[in-house]
Image: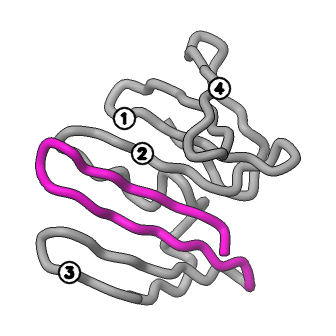
Amino acid sequence: MQIFLGQPLNVASQVKIEKKVVMNQQYYVIKGQNFTYYVKTKNGIVSEVIAKAPYKLAPASYFIQNPQNCVKKLIMRVPLRMAKYEYDCNGTVYHYTTFGVPGNLITSASLK
């Protein structure tokens, strides 16, 4: 499942969506085949996505359209634990972060 940043939240009709409040912020919770997505929107436009899974990291292409056409910059890296990247796509800047240990992996992406 792909949930693109900067686009309206569109998911298949057979997918169940819940609304949850986490730390005073409202998220849509979407359970996909491999990931559980926590999606934050502003005026119906996706501004942040967090994907959780036990043994997989979601690739940047799940959140950023055509990341191969963007300038990718490593911001910070902690070996075997975390990496934070910045994608500059024609003036739109995205942050993409991976974090966790096997059994609890988190991938997040947001508009800067």
**CA distance for labels 2 and 1:** 6 Å
Identify the mark at residue 19; answer none if there is no mark: 4
Single out the residue that lies furthest toward the top: 14
Q: Is residue 111 magenta?
A: yes
Q: Nearer the viewer, mark 4 or mark 1?
A: 4
The first of marks 2 and 4 along the sequence is 4
Mark 3 and mark 1 residues within 8 Å of each other at the beta carbon: no
Is label 1 in a helix, a strand or a loop? Answer: loop
> Which amino acid type is marked by label 3?
Val
Q: Nearer the viewer, mark 3 or mark 1?
A: 3
Q: Is residue 90 magenta?
A: no
The first of marks 3 and 1 along the sequence is 1
Q: Quadrant of residue 60?
A: bottom left
Judged left or right of residue 79, residue 32 is: right
On the image, the x and y values in percent for residue 105 come to 25, 50
Identify the mark at residue 51; answer none if there is no mark: 2
The magenta segment is 91-112
The first of marks 4 and 1 along the sequence is 4
**CA distance for labels 2 and 4:** 15 Å
Identify the mark at residue 78; answer none if there is no mark: 3
Is label 3 in a helix, a strand or a loop? Answer: strand
